[in-house]
Amino acid sequence: MLILDCDIASTLAKVDKIDLLSKVFSHTKICITISVYTELIRAKRAGFSFPDKIFTNIPVITMNSDELIVFQKFSQYNYIHFGEAEGVSICKNRGAIFLTNDSQVVKFCMKNNIKVLNLKDFLVLVAIKKIITFSEMNELIRQIEEKDNTFIKNKADIIDEY
């Protein structure tokens, strides 16, 4: 199972590449949490269309009672938003992978033995599996940085996989 945070889901939807998730994780259930869904609904109500690309491709998952207890603990940390705390709680309990672009959350997951990937890790997997060509990857990186105002560190690590 793979749980997405709002930033990653939004980034991929804005560049119309949400389908890359199922291509990289072809035998994995991919979900968003209720908190992420709520954040995306706010964006949709503000006039953005990218949330629809997520809603039509990625189901929503809910926490069970054990995960709620972990969520209550994790949500006490100021640097973890509710969507991330919810996703990380589910991942910890179910042995799932959390996909985030928040470096603080990546460190938190690593410290707490929770499987985690960031955007660069995901793009490296896309490159390793040759899901898109070298030129398409360069264009994807450019689009992500432009449309999502996101800087991808160490881009060479991704490109070197070609």
Image: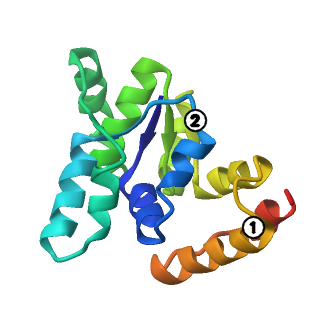
| SS assignment at label 1 | loop
Which residue is the site of mark 2?
Answer: 26
Please, what is the three-letter code of the amino acid marked with disc 1? Answer: Asn
Q: Nearer the viewer, residue 7 or 142?
A: 142
How much space separates mark 1 and mark 2, taking CA atoms? Answer: 26 Å
Q: Nearer the viewer, residue 76 or 102?
A: 102
The structure residue drawn at horizontal position 40% and vertical position 35%, both measured from the top left corner, is 88
Q: Is residue 60 above or below residue 135?
A: above
Q: Which of 1 and 68 is in front in this view?
A: 1
Residue 122's spot in the image, x, y percent? 63, 51
| SS assignment at label 2 | loop
Looking at the rendered image, the quarter that the C terminus falls into is bottom right
Q: Closer to the N terminus: mark 1 or mark 2?
A: 2
Please, what is the three-letter code of the amino acid marked with disc 2? Answer: Ser
The structure residue drawn at horizontal position 62% and vertical position 43%, both measured from the top left corner, is 24
Residue 155's spot in the image, x, y percent? 74, 69
The structure residue drawn at horizontal position 17% and vertical position 77%, both measured from the top left corner, is 47
Crowdedness of circle 1 by 10 Å Cα count: few (<14), some, many (20+)? few
Which residue is the site of mark 1?
Answer: 154
Crowdedness of circle 2 by 10 Å Cα count: few (<14), some, many (20+)? few
Residue 80's spot in the image, x, y percent? 36, 49
Q: How many labels does the image show?
A: 2
Residue lying at the far top in this picture: please name it: 66
| Colouring of the image | rainbow
The structure residue drawn at horizontal position 62% and vertical position 80%, both measured from the top left corner, is 142
Residue contact between numbered discs 1 and 2, judged by CB atoms under 8 Å? no
Q: Is residue 89 above or below residue 127?
A: above
Q: Is residue 68 above or below residue 58?
A: above
Foreground: disc 1 or disc 2 = 2
